[in-house]
Amino acid sequence: MLGTRSIQEELQAIVGGDGLHPATSADANCGVSPRWVVEPENEQQAAAVLAAANSAGIAVVPRGGGTKLDWGNPPKRADLILSTARLNRIIEHAWADLTVTVEAGCTLQALQAALAQHGQRLAFDGLWPERATVGGALSTNDSGALRLRFGALRDLIIGATLALPDGTLASSGGKVVKNVAGYDLPKLATGALGTLGVIIRAVFRLHPLCPTASSLTFAPSSWQEMQRLLPSIQDSKLAHTSFQIRATSGSAPQADVLFEATEAGQAAQKEHLRSLLGSTPVTDSSSTRVWQARQDLFSSVNENSVVAKFSVLPSDIPKSIEWIERVSDPRKASWQAVIQATGLGWLRYEADASWLGEALVSLRTQFERAAGSFILLHRPTSLRTLEAWGNAGDALPLMHAVKFRLDPQNTLNPGRFVGGI
């Protein structure tokens, strides 16, 4: 291993005097403090930084906007933060082909603003768009309510360039929507939490920006009524864009349906939905506030807060609330949940950490028995020893093999992913 002075000088030679600085307490990752922060300004510098770190045996934590640093397990080591802050350009917007090539450090908000100038968008509504970056959203496999109509980010990405730990710049895919070139590195890197390679740039397919949108919110009197209504809406001919359910401990559920179409089209769709709902109370709104409900779960999290992401079959959505209520003691905890019609949900608990640990283990067991998943995103410091990901099943040996193939020295984000990868 190179000495501290040697690797520091090597990194400074790669990125220049402004590209390397000592880490501060604000750069800590799940309580693990790095020594330096490096900010390459092009893909060649990023690759060279990784090669130097890999040779020196130091651990690298990729970072975009820093909005999800507490997701996953605490890293086993974190010597160097590799920030994509200066890799923030929109390289090419081929608006006639409905594609865009963008560097990983570009924020989601900046990207959407540029695309909107040509009446287009990346059909993705990620968390904290003003700070979150393209690379961070891909690495954490973030997924908003637009997934129902347009798919997840892994369905929208068609090409990517990754910097691998040995300094290789690996590209896969291309700039056309129908693309079958090479190995599917983009999808491999999506959701890998930066453990396989550092995403440097990505190519996405785009969709037209819809000029008008509105929502209907309906409030069944009980979860039994919600269970009756869900399949009738999901199996109908409605052309809705998003469909989410909001639930709070001790209260009846509410559901929101988003329509994007002409005014005449929206009116026809709403009328159809009202006919399906019958006498269920309905509110019409042009406000987008209800679609911030998922992000609101992360507001003001503290040492008594847990935010988890879970998945179930769409038909099991009402059952998932039953499981949550069965585990929860109203004298000790309160909870809120936002669940998409795809079966993805987010749950926030407020309770004493000493009670939360046992409840979370019980909930995870129930979800996994039903072929679902239960992943801890934010949790108190006292619960960081609790595995974030749950059981990976028989996929774990293959995941370890892929990790060893791309990062044999365990340089990138060691320990943060499933099974301690």
Image (cartoon, rainbow, N blue to C red):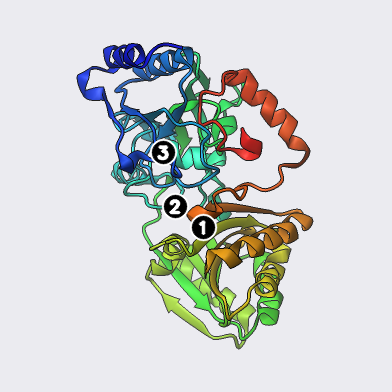
Spot the residue most to the bottom.
279
Residue at image x 69%, y 24%?
401
- Quarter of the figure that contains the C terminus: top right
- Using the image as rendered, state which of residue 386 and residue 164 is in the foreground: 386
Callout 1 amino acid: Ala
Say which label, 2 or 1, has the lower sequence index: 2
Check the image and report above or below for 190 versus 372.
above
- Residue at image mark 1: 145
Residue at image x 72%, y 35%?
396
- Residue at image mark 3: 134
- Using the image as rendered, state which of residue 59 and residue 125 is in the foreground: 59
Check the image and report above or below for 84 versus 28.
above
Residue 66 seen in render: yes
Callout 2 amino acid: Asp
Check disc 1 and report its element: helix, strand or loop. Answer: loop
Q: CA distance from mark 3 to mark 1?
A: 17 Å
